[in-house]
């Protein structure tokens, strides 16, 4: 059973920044594509950003391009999501997820999920 643990969520004003972290102890981290997803109340879970094993290949949702950056430290088994210029519409529970293989923002490609961390952006 893969364990993923997110941290770093919180309340921030519009225009502010947060950095989320996701630790994956026990995972052969470098073999996995890591993704960040979010789910707002009443909405489907959507992909935000993903990074293949080396960190060189990444993909972002159009809604966050230029504002969010995904990075990973394979030595620490940790993936990060730096979120800048936050907007109220970024408010959601953010999840990290792990997948073997291809780079994807589809939630169906990911088999292992964290419990989520709440991000709230006030206007």
Image: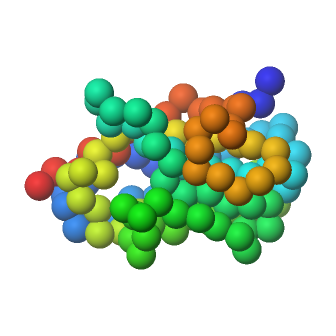
Query: For the C terminus, which image quadrant?
Result: bottom left
Residue at 24% across, 51% down: 89
Residue at 42% across, 75% down: 66
Displayed quadrant of residue 1: top right
**Residue 12 in sight:** yes
30 vs 13, nearest the viewer: 30
* In the image, residue 72 above or below residue 97: below
Is residue 28 rendered to the left or right of residue 16? Answer: right
Residue 80 % position (x, y) = 58, 58
Is residue 14 rendered to the left or right of residue 24? Answer: left
Residue 117 % position (x, y) = 44, 38
Residue at 54% across, 29% down: 115
Residue at 24% across, 59% down: 87
Farthest left residue? 123
Farthest top residue? 1
Residue 102 % position (x, y) = 77, 53
* In the image, residue 41 above or below residue 74: above
**Residue 80 in sight:** no
Q: How many marks?
A: 0
Q: How has the structure been colored for display?
A: rainbow
Residue 105 % position (x, y) = 58, 50
């Amino acid at each position: 059973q893969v364990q993923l643990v997110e941290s770093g969520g919180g309340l921030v004003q519009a225009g502010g920044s947060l950095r989320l972290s996701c630790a994956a102890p026990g995972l052969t981290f470098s073999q996995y594509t890591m993704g960040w997803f979010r789910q707002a109340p009443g909405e489907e879970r959507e992909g935000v950003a993903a990074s293949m094993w080396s960190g060189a290949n990444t993909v972002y949702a159009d809604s966050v391009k230029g504002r969010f950056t995904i990075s990973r430290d394979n030595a620490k088994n940790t993936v990060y999501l730096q979120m800048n210029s936050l907007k109220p519409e970024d408010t959601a529970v953010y999840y990290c997820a792990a997948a073997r293989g291809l780079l994807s923002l589809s939630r169906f490609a990911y088999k292992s999920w964290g419990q989520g961390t709440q991000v709230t952006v006030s206007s």
